[in-house]
Image (cartoon, grey):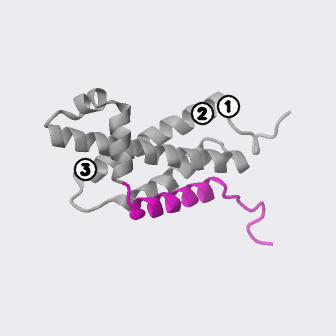
């Protein structure tokens, strides 16, 4: 018999939650950045907090929650960078984004994504990962006050 407070979702449900949350976070970051006139490198930080809270809401607890939040944040970052690269390709060649995503290929898009990373993105990723892991691993005290 398991204690429901300490039970984590199964492996398949966990993987699906992490991947789908990460993809949604990456898309939100990319399209919010495209719509904004200012640089939005640090938008990944509140998205990391949201991913950590999302996993807590789904019942992730303990080390499992911390690990899944870190992986989800890294996947969201990688997917957003991939989308940013596809947008650059689409703008350069005058293609629709859908065509750039499917015709450019993963090798070219990944190379462009790596070439456009800066220190700011690395700092933002570090902060977002730490924030997501902290929110996901947050424990409530059993007694708020003695």
Q: Position of residue 84 (x, y in %)?
A: 31, 45
Please rate how many residues cluster around mark 1, counting C-alpha atoms within 10 Å: few if below 14, some from 14 to 19, many from 20.
few
Determine the CA span between mark 2 and mark 1.
6 Å
Q: Position of residue 9 (x, y in %)?
A: 68, 35
The quadrant of the image that shows the N terminus is top right
Question: Which residue occupies 42% across, 41% down?
Answer: 79
Question: Which residue occupies 56% across, 51% down?
Answer: 52
SS state under label 3: helix
Q: How many marks?
A: 3
Q: Which residue is mark 2?
A: 15
The overriding secondary structure of the stretch rendered in magenta is: helix
SS state under label 1: helix
The span picked out in magenta is 117-146
Residue 133 falls within the magenta-colored stretch: yes
The quadrant of the image that shows the C terminus is bottom right
Q: Which residue is mark 1?
A: 11
Tag 2 near tag 1, CB within 8 Å: yes
Residue 66 in the image: above or below residue 109? below
Q: Which residue is mark 3?
A: 34
Q: Earlier in the sequence, mark 3 or mark 2?
A: 2
Residue 28 shows in this picture: no
């Amino acid at each position: 018999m398991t204690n429901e407070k300490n039970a984590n979702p199964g492996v398949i449900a966990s993987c699906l939650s992490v991947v789908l949350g990460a993809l949604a976070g990456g898309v939100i970051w990319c399209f919010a950045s495209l719509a904004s006139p200012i640089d939005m490198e640090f938008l990944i930080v509140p998205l990391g907090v949201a991913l950590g809270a999302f996993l807590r809401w789904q019942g992730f607890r303990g080390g499992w929650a911390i690990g899944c939040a870190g992986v989800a944040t890294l996947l969201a970052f990688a997917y957003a960078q991939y989308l940013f690269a596809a947008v650059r390709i689409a703008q350069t060649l005058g293609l629709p984004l859908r065509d750039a995503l499917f015709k450019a290929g993963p090798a070219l898009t990944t190379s462009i994504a790596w070439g456009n990373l800066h220190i700011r993105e690395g700092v933002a990723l570090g902060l977002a990962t730490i924030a997501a892991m902290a929110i996901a691993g947050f424990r409530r005290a059993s007694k708020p006050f003695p």
